[in-house]
Amino acid sequence: MSEAMTKQPVITLFFDNARIGQILDPQSFSELRFGGIQVQMAHLIKGLLKTGLYQIVVFSDKPFSYPGVEVRSPLNLIKKGAPIVSRWINSYRKKQAFHADTPRRIFMHSHIQNPALLDAADALGIETVMWINSDALVDGSSYFAPEYLKRFDSHLSKHDWVICQSGYQQEHLKARQDIDAPIVRTGVERNEVVRPKNTILWVGRCVASKQPWLFLDIARRLPECEYRMVLSTPQQADVEFAEVLNVLASDVSNLVIERNVPHADMAERYARALAFVSTSLFEGAPNVFAEAGMAGTPVFSLAVNPANMLDGEELGVYAEGDFEQMIEQLKDYLDAAPEEKVARQNRARRFAQSQWSIDDMVQSYRQVFEHDMVVRKEGMAK
């Protein structure tokens, strides 16, 4: 019998990330707004449910359906009115939001957009975990507004545990916050390799920090290839930027631009890509790099090496911000003999499979939830 069939849930895990629903139940939303965070959390939820040890609650203002997942409305606290009444109602709402019949309750946090839930969990004595989703959050990068970073830093101290993705993040958390954070690597699904590979692929949100216009320059300068750009446009400003990009790309005949491709359809894009190009100035959860590698698609990154993924050049290469260098790196690859291209593709795939297993990721989280957090609490109680 499976583990799920022989054990009763002992942990309720709460998630404050409504967009997870778009990965777990793609039919539930008409708008497509997901990123690496949502993909990672969806993989985690699926893996934990298989163990039979977890109940899952997702706070979401939009309904969705997935077996074993309970959807609850986000916490809405009263900020005005008679203090005695508002305090009583708010206390009741906090308890209802985090109600669970299991012996342990853990709140998994991946952002600080809605601090009410974290404050409520902290007040109710619920264990809390913060998942670091970007290098820029821990190294003080200017890509986040100073007030956001200040609020983020103040929130870190409220968590029982902080989880990071790489040695880089781990070192900065220790230096800036004196936090000892375990590393849990990204987990992505394996993908089939499709040959012949025939496109150069770019994937990302249509915002200035991703520098999508540079991809147009690459297509112009290396016109012998076909190019595909997949844009995510969750906000109106992103839509407007995409319209400008369409105008800028009007002279690039070898480029196809797509918007808001469902996650389930992205595997095929990666599989057919000869190379994956990132022109981004920063990355959060680096799923796109790992997903490219799983499909045997080498990565060419201009300005970011998230979670040290490109160290050793197994997955691909990092141009350290030098655009001309990246052009030359990509040109050398495209001009290589067919067997050399295949060798690089196979190397990227082997490396991805060795690094980013979903099963390994789930086991790492279970180590934190079921062992490390328990040991830490027992040690603090002595």
Image (spheres, rainbow, N blue to C red):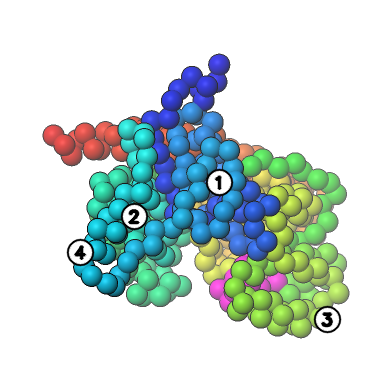
SS class, disc 2: helix
Local crowd size for mark 2, using a 10 Å CA cut-off: few (<14), some (14–19), many (≥20): some
Mark 4 is on which residue type?
Ile
Q: Which residue is mark 3?
A: 251
Residue 210 in the magenta stretch? The answer is yes
Q: CA distance from mark 3 to mark 1?
A: 39 Å
Q: CA distance from mark 4 to mark 1?
A: 40 Å
The answer to whether marks 4 and 2 mark residues whose Cβ atoms lie closer than 8 Å is no
Query: Is residue 126 shown to the viewer in this render?
Result: yes
Q: CA distance from mark 4 to mark 2?
A: 14 Å
Q: Which residue is mark 4?
A: 84
Mark with earlier residue (4, 1): 1
Q: Position of residue 60 (x, y in %)?
A: 50, 56
Mark 1 is on which residue type?
Ala
Q: Foreground: 136 or 61?
A: 61
Q: Foreground: 157 or 45?
A: 45
- The residue most toward the left is 382
Q: Which residue is mark 2?
A: 93
Q: Which residue is mark 1?
A: 42
